[in-house]
Image (spheres, grey):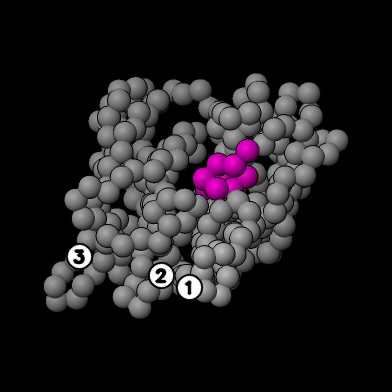
Amino acid sequence: MRVGIAAVVLTLGLAITLIACGGEPEAADPTSPSGSANVATVVTAIKGADGTSATAGGYTLGDVSLPTEAGTPGKVSFTITKDAGDQGHSPVTDYIEEQTKDLHLYVVRDDLEVFRHLHPTQGEPGEWSGDLTLPAGGTYRVVVEFAARTPDGKGEQAMLGTTAKVAGASEVDVPGSDDGTVIAALEETPKPGIDQEIGVLISDPAGKPVNLGTYLGVYAHVTAFSRETGEVIHLHPLGGPENGEDGTRLGIHVKPPKAGDYVFFVQVRVDGMIHTLRLPVTV
């Protein structure tokens, strides 16, 4: 299985990668003249677009709005624009699909105790919105991840972020690495600044392997956030799950940019249900 855009860029330190999504290698298309697999798109990572700034590489995340009150169903909305020079900013409308979606949205409270991973829809050109209910008030970081198609048919990958406040009581039930049905754990602590593969173990409360399905085309969706900087690391597993005595193992590539405190959010589908597990890690 191939890693996604941000996984390659942020964990392997590469400036250019190829994007082709899915949980397993794609088979050759028998209807194509050559019978070869679909050609991947070259995507270039934008330097500094790690979710800590609303603007990078000419792209801007703007007009961010969250529900005004915690506990009340509401909307999240925002715009994505590109600097067009003398013509001002133009809406970004052409995206390269990554992990089955044009855009991934993360809404995370600044203490990393609330996490939402959403897939809003694009209405008017460059304008995105989606349903959202937040369980508690506070300052939230709104991070978008996308790859915009460039005129030459290639792509530019970015993670842009900004903050917004939501009214309401701040108390919240903080999710853990064990939700009573599924448990997630790291085999070892990642080392800062080093490209490495570590194992994520998924098990039931008895420590046994689980029936792991795919979510967004892969066997797990893993996103890490730095407590100190807010930097985002989007990771993907390598290969398929392996069942063992300690549970179901998935290998992931990871390269934390620096030492510090992180929170890993692991999302997996077990027996048809999506589970989100929270793992604080000090590297």
Label 3 or label 1, whichever lies nearer to me, is 1
Query: Which residue type carries mark 2?
Result: Gly
Residue identifier under label 2: 155
| 229 in magenta | no
Q: Are marks 2 and 3 in contact (CB under 8 Å)?
A: no
Q: Are marks 1 and 2 in contact (CB under 8 Å)?
A: yes
The mark nearer the N terminus, 1 or 2, is 1
Q: Which mark is residue 81?
A: none
Image coords of residue 68 (percent x, y): 25, 30
Q: Which mark is residue 90?
A: 3
Left or right: where 246 falls relative to 88: right
The mark nearer the N terminus, 3 or 1, is 1
Q: CA distance from mark 3 to mark 1?
A: 23 Å
Q: Choose top left, top right, bottom left or bottom right for residue 164.
A: top left
Q: How many numbered callouts?
A: 3
Q: Are marks 3 and 1 in contact (CB under 8 Å)?
A: no
Camera-nearest residue between 10 and 19: 19
Q: Judging from the image, what secondary structure is the residue with disc 1 in?
A: strand
Camera-nearest residue between 23 and 46: 23
The residue shown at (65%, 23%) is: 181
- In this rendering, is residue 241 above or below 37? above
- In which quadrant will I find the N terminus? bottom right
The mark nearer the N terminus, 2 or 3, is 3
Residue identifier under label 1: 42
Label 2 or label 3, whichever lies nearer to me, is 2
Q: CA distance from mark 2 to mark 3?
A: 17 Å
At label 1, counting other C-alpha atoms closer than 10 Å, the crowd grade (few under 14, some 14-19, many 20 or more) is some
| Residues shaded magenta | 213-226
Left or right: where 254 falls relative to 229: right
The residue shown at (34%, 43%) is: 120
Can residue 132 be seen here? The reply is yes
Query: Which residue type carries mark 3?
Result: Ser
